[in-house]
Image (tube, helix red, strand yellow):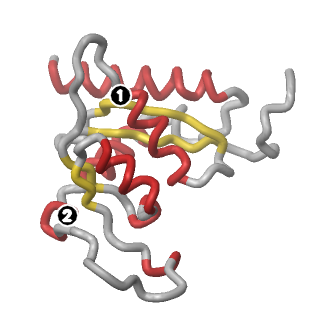
Amino acid sequence: MGYDGYKKVKGNKLIALVDRNGLPLACTVYPANVHDSQLYEPTLNAFTIPDVRDHPAIISADPAYDSREIRQYNRNRRIKSNIPVNRRSRKHSKRGRPRRFDPELYKKRSAIERFFSWIEAFKKVTPRYERYEHSFLGLIHLACVMMIWKILG
């Protein structure tokens, strides 16, 4: 086992992309000491369908994802960003054109909260202290399959 560049941390971080009904589209697992904004692109890249060049039209995200890089990434892929401004990360108020933000659309972001409450219903997934990330991701995928099976079946 080699050094992977991360400090030893307890736990893993689950990042998910869900549709407006709360069904999972992509899930990724990373060590808990990596900031959420650095995991944005790998999570969107995990949502790929072979031979289909489809992407989300609008993404609503937490204020933790308010960065110039994420907004530029979305703009280059013609994805509309609905991310509130994170006032804690700004030293000075931003001049110029205000960021586009729709509070009514942001209220529908509760789908991700519903997804995480479904995931927490699976007792093995809740503690998040698996030794390996791939075994934790396997449990997450199993929980996602069970969620989709319950809805479709």
Residue count near mark 2 (Cα–Cα under 10 Å), binned few <14, some 14–19, many ≥20 = few
Q: What residue is shown at x 18% (from left), y 43% (from top)?
A: 57
Between marks 1 and 2 in the image, the one whose residue lies nearer the viewer:
1
Residue 63: image location, x then y, percent: 40, 66
Q: Residue furthest right?
A: 2
Observer-nearest of 68 and 47:
68
* Amino acid type at image mark 2: Lys
Q: In which image quadrant can residue 21 be found?
A: top left
| Apparent side of residue 18 relative to residue 34 in the rendered image (left or right) | left
Q: In which image quadrant can residue 2 be found?
A: top right
Q: What residue is shown at x 22% (from left), y 38% (from top)?
A: 56
- Badge 1 or badge 2: first in the primary sequence: 1
Determine the CA span between mark 1 and mark 2.
23 Å
Residue 6: image location, x then y, percent: 77, 42
Residue 119: image location, x then y, percent: 40, 38
* Amino acid type at image mark 1: Phe
State how many labels appear. 2
Observer-nearest of 40 and 121:
40
| Apparent side of residue 148 relative to residue 64 in the rendered image (left or right) | left
- Element at label 2: helix
Observer-nearest of 124 and 26:
26
Residue 92: image location, x then y, percent: 49, 88
Q: Which residue is mark 1?
A: 47
Q: In which image quadrant can residue 105 be found?
A: bottom left
| Apparent side of residue 51 relative to residue 69 in the rendered image (left or right) | left
On screen, 51 above or below 82?
above
Q: Which residue is mark 2?
A: 107
Residue 87's disc is none
